[in-house]
Structure formats: structure tokens, C-alpha cells
Image (cartoon, helix red, strand yellow):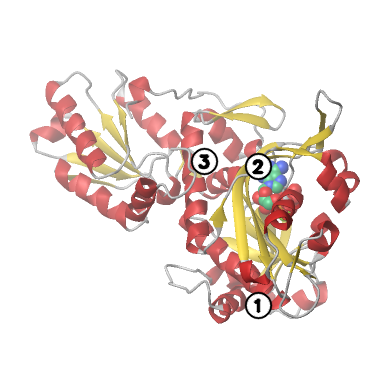
Amino acid sequence: MRLSRYFLPVLKENPAEAQIVSHRLMLRAGMIKQASAGIYSWLPLGFKVLRKIENIVHEEQARAGHMAMLMPTIQSADLWRESGRYDAYGEEMLRIKDRGGRDMLFTPTAEELITDIFRAHVSSYKDLPLTMYQIQWKFRDEIRPRFGVMRGREFLMKDGYNFDLTKEDALHSYHRHLVSYLRTYERMGLQAIPMRADSGPIGGEYTHEFLVLAETGESEVFYDSTVTDLTFGDREIDYDSHQECAAIMEEFTSRYARTDETHDEALFNEIPEERRRSARGIEVGQIFYFGTQYSEALGATVQVPEGKPVPVHMGSHGIGVSRLMGAIIEANHDDKGIIWPEGVTPYHAGIVNLKQGDAEADAACEKLYKSLTALGLEPLYDDRNERAGGKFATMDLIGLPWRITVGPRGLKNGVVELTSRRTGESEEMPPNKAVERIHQIYSGHHATEHVEMMAKRSFHTYI
Ligand code: ATP
Ligand code: MG
């Protein structure tokens, strides 16, 4: 992409309405525009990152053996009356009437609809286990939408649902989701700590929330500091193995880590004092096992070889896809702007031409642009007729992890400059070396895999 043709409405001033840094930077970098309270348009740069986040979620769900699908945003109230949640959900549910006077609603979550699909098509235990998920817009009429995309009214959520024959199988699904979520967040450059949580209106006894530690987080959390030493890394794991998934579950959830709703002061005090931490966190996901409560209410049963049909064991699992963008920025920025982790950066590298119109500099930039593109990478080329200072400020604000600076003086010696946004360190090298280096960096970050998956388009993505 060439910046001269891009729609990037950067703001010079700090917008007064933004209270936290991620909201401020998303507005300043021209990523989103508020349409009404808690409802946003996603401008090209913001939408590009949103797709990157979605794609990582899709890839990790596919790896865990879960199937992508898509359910409607507008649902009939009937199913929700059947489950008893139409009234229970309260004011957060946006209720709508169609022209025939029928009660409809904008989906805040989809347990009812997926269970309806299940009961219509699955009747035998032989069709289990089954896990399907979607990435779809949700609406919750939050009392206080705030902090930009962090607490919106309309927001993008990955919601997944598992159907299993027994509690044991459903707990395997629970563990498998935990593992896949750990990988998902790490690929986005985030440490999200699974913490024991409260199940709230969904019900059920097993639930963990994933929290990214940040001062601006809305949740109060308590944990043993050693949980922050745990990383999943690039371990290969057999998702079908109950044992392997359970072992990871054990490893990541046996130490004390709880939200304020489940916090137990006495248990917490058993941890050596120097390891006790209380902090703020951003909830970026939650997993639930809730047994047979929805399947009983909605009659989702399967025939077993002996005896009567039995209700299936279910769980549901959510990732705050749009909230994640805010969380990633909260965890990765400095006073100049965003610092994207390689896994979600909107463009892989920026090219800054210090002297637009200089034949040699222009040609070198074009060549860099083409070489990077040929390798399946996406550069953002600042080809505007602007001063170097302005170009650097824009690049720093939008936070691409790598910048190649090209100027007539360097080219005389056959070099360009490669700069890391995170460390600020620069190194001079011949242009082809810079291309090679960037290629290498992204090969180590699932880039090749990412590109391959895109090429296959095995699932719905907005490319
Ligand atoms: P919260 O406690 O923050 O209101 P929740 O527990 O009600 O969230 P879930 O039903 O668990 O939310 O939804 C799954 C994920 O969707 C959450 O972990 C969160 O990341 C995201 N999410 C929930 N509500 C919002 C919102 N209003 N805006 C943006 N993301 C949200
Ligand atoms: Mg939650």
C-alpha cells in the first residue's frame, strides 16, 4: 500500500473524549471512528488489524479441530423464551419488533440458536463430540460504554460451543479450549492469564477468564506472581489427547489466579507474601462448562445404545476480538504511538522515502516495495511529498514494527536504514539485506503459515 493513496485520517491533537491510551491512539492513528455511543466504524487501518486478529483466532480454532460457521445477528425472541433467558437477560438485550409485530433481538450471545441447530440435526451419540464457533458481531446495551472498543455496545466476538456425550468429554473440550486460547493470545504478543472466575448468568461451575494485566483494566485480579513466568511457546500438542490437554490445564491453572468475584483472602494468604499480587486486568476471553442446563431446557438430546435419549453436555467459549485490539495497544505502546507485535501488525514494514522525487531514492523504494511484496509481505510505503520528520511521526504513531528509511545519502554508499519500532535501534545495510532480514523475522512469526492459510482460504475471512 502507498500512503499517498491510503485513507489514514491521522489526528494531531489528543481527542478529549478518550480516557485511556488505546482509545486515544486508535483515534489518532485513524483506525476507528465513533458512529454513536459504543458503536464504531472500522477505518482501513483498524479493520486490517481486526482481520489479523480474526485470522489468528480462525487458525488456532482450526488447529484445535473446531469448525467455523456463522449465525445471524438478528434472532427471534421465541428461542430465548424457551430457554428462559428472554426476561432474565434484562436491559442489556436490544429488543426489536419486525413489521409483523414479532419480537426479535440483536444477539448478545448464541447458546440458544446453536442448541436449536444441534437439536434439529443431531440425534445420535455417534455424531459427538462436536465443536462449532463463529466470529460475529454482538450487541449488548451496556450502561456505560467506554474506553473505545474495550467496552462497546456493538463488538466482535468469537463464540464457540461444544456438545459432548459425557461430563468427562465436555471437560476435555474445556481443557482443549484453554490450550487453544493460550496459543491464540501468545501469537498476538499478549500474555493472557487464565483466572478462576464467576460464571454469571450463563451458569455452571467451571469457568476461567483470560486476563491481560494492564493498569486501565476494568477487572480487579489477585495472583501468585509466578503465573506470569508461564508461557506456552511453540509446543506441539495433540488436541485429541485428554491427558495432554489436562496436563496443560493443570500447569496453567493450579497456581492462585482469580478475579475479585472468586477471590479467597485466606487461600491467597497462603502464598508467600513476596509473591502475592493484586492488579488490574482486561478480560479478553472466557471459557465455560455448564453441563446440561441448555440442552435440557431446549431438548438437545442424543440416542445412546442403551436406554432413553440423554441431554448433551455443553460449554461455551468467547474471545473479545474487537476488545483485543485495545488490549494489545494497552500492552504495546510508548509516548510516540503504537508498537504492534509482529503477529498482528497491519503492515509488515514501513518504507520511508526521505527525498520523494529524487530518481534514485524513488527507484530504490519501488524496488524494496516489489521485493517485499513478492515474498508475500505487505509493506506500507510513505511516498508522500512530506518532510522526513512528519513521515517518521506518522510511522511511529501507527506502530509498524520495522521501518526501512531510504535517502540519497545512504544510497550513495549502497545502504538503507532498518529501524526497530520497539527498541528504536537502527542498522545500515544494503537494501536486499533489509528485505532478507524482514522476511526472516516474519518467517519466525507464523508468517509463512499465515500466508499459506490465506491462500487456501479454508474458512470465511474478509480478505
Ligand atoms: P464483561 O465482564 O467485560 O462485561 P462478559 O463476561 O459479560 O464481559 P462474555 O460473555 O464472557 O463477556 O464475552 C466474551 C468476551 O467478549 C469477553 O471476555 C470480552 O473480551 C468480550 N466482551 C464482552 N463484552 C464486551 C463489550 N461490551 N465490548 C467489547 N468486548 C466485550
Ligand atoms: Mg466474561
Q: How many marks?
A: 3
Dot 3 amino acid type: Leu
Q: Secondary structure at mark 2?
A: helix
- Pick whichever of labels 2 and 3 is earlier in the sequence: 3
- The image quadrant where one finds ligand 2 is bottom right
Image quadrant occupied by the N terminus: top left
Q: Is 101 positioned to the left or the right of 367 in the image?
A: right
Nearest to viewer (mark 2 / mark 3): 3
Q: Taking 320 as reference, is 60 above or below it? A: below
* Residue that numbered label 1 is attached to: 254
Q: Which corner quadrant of the image does residue 380 belong to?
A: top left
Residue at 54% across / 63% down in the picture?
Answer: 180
Q: CA distance from mark 3 to mark 1?
A: 33 Å
Mark number displayed over residue 246: none
Residue at 35% across / 27% down in the picture?
Answer: 391
Q: CA distance from mark 2 to mark 3?
A: 13 Å
Q: Are marks 2 and 3 in contact (CB under 8 Å)?
A: no
Dot 1 amino acid type: Ser
* Residue that numbered label 2 is attached to: 150
Tell me: is circle 2 under 8 Å from ligand 1.
yes
Nearest to viewer (mark 3 / mark 1): 3
- Pick whichever of labels 3 and 1 is earlier in the sequence: 3
Q: Residue 262, position in %: x, y? A: 79, 66
Foreground pick, 278 / 88? 88
Q: Taking 196 as reference, is 27 above or below it? A: above
Tell me: is circle 3 under 8 Å from ligand 1.
no
